[in-house]
Amino acid sequence: MGQKVLLNAKEVNIILHRLACQLIENHKDFTDTVLIGIQPRGKYLANRLITLLKEDYKIKNLQSGQLDITFYRDDFRRSDKPLEANATEMDCAIEDKKIVFIDDVLYTGRSIRSALTAIQSFGRPREIELLTLIDRRFSRHLPIQPDYRGRQVDAINEEKVKVNWVENEGEDAVYLVNN
């Protein structure tokens, strides 16, 4: 199993700042916006962006949440091993708000489709956008595209994109892994 570095820590940091600035351009003071990390891996990206927006760009009163999509997935019954759900944390109203779904890798689009279904349990947003660190553009099964993307990666289906976060794996890096 070989792996190639797609992004190192410095490049990840630059992309995070660019994504934060793009969000500021489109959402100004974030009054009507809720940033939602898709569990399990999108929460790391969401938390990093929220920290940047608050500390570096002085955005106040950011509303955020974490959405578990485990039981909304179309493949959740296809596994022999028991599923472990992640925590959903939705401490703010989403009714008539602008929602930004945040996930680390956009691959087939099935996770986002699941998130679109899951979010309906909390209300009806005015609009929904998608922010992703990595967009695997040639692997889509559904017509879902990101509004904000960190980097586009052309990987064949046997290759896996692995995103490491310092909070979880001890480093910020993105790898292309050959199985």
Image: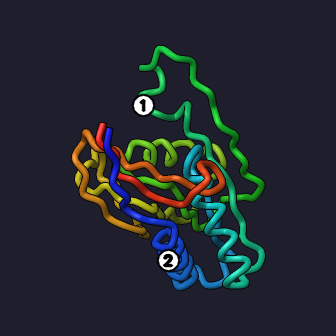
Where in the figure is residue 129, as x and y percent of width and height? 48, 64
- Cα distance, mark 2 to mark 1? 35 Å
Residue occupying image coordinates x 45% and y 62%: 133
Q: How is the model colour-coded?
A: rainbow
- Vertical arrangement, residue 173 with respect to residue 12, above or below: above
- Vertical arrangement, residue 43 with respect to residue 25, above or below: above
* Kind of residue indicated by mark 1: Asp
Q: Is residue 136 visible?
A: yes
Tell me the number on the disc at residue 38.
none
Q: Name which of mark 2 and mark 1 comes first in the sequence.
A: 2
Q: How many marks?
A: 2
Q: Is residue 124 visible?
A: no
* Mark 2 or 1, closer to the camera: 2
Marks 2/1 in contact by CB < 8 Å: the verdict is: no
Please state if 36 lies on the left or on the right of 131 as rendered.
right
Q: Quadrant of residue 28?
A: bottom right
* Quadrant holding the C terminus: top left
| Residue lying at the far top of the rendered structure | 80
Q: Which residue is mark 1?
A: 74
Q: Which residue is mark 2?
A: 14
Between residues 15 and 33, which one lies in front from this camera angle? 15
Between residues 126 and 65, which one lies in front from this camera angle? 65
Residue occupying image coordinates x 25% and y 52%: 155
- Vertical arrangement, residue 80 with respect to residue 11, above or below: above
Please state if 160 lies on the left or on the right of 30 as rendered.
left
Where in the figure is residue 174, as x and y percent of width and height? 43, 57
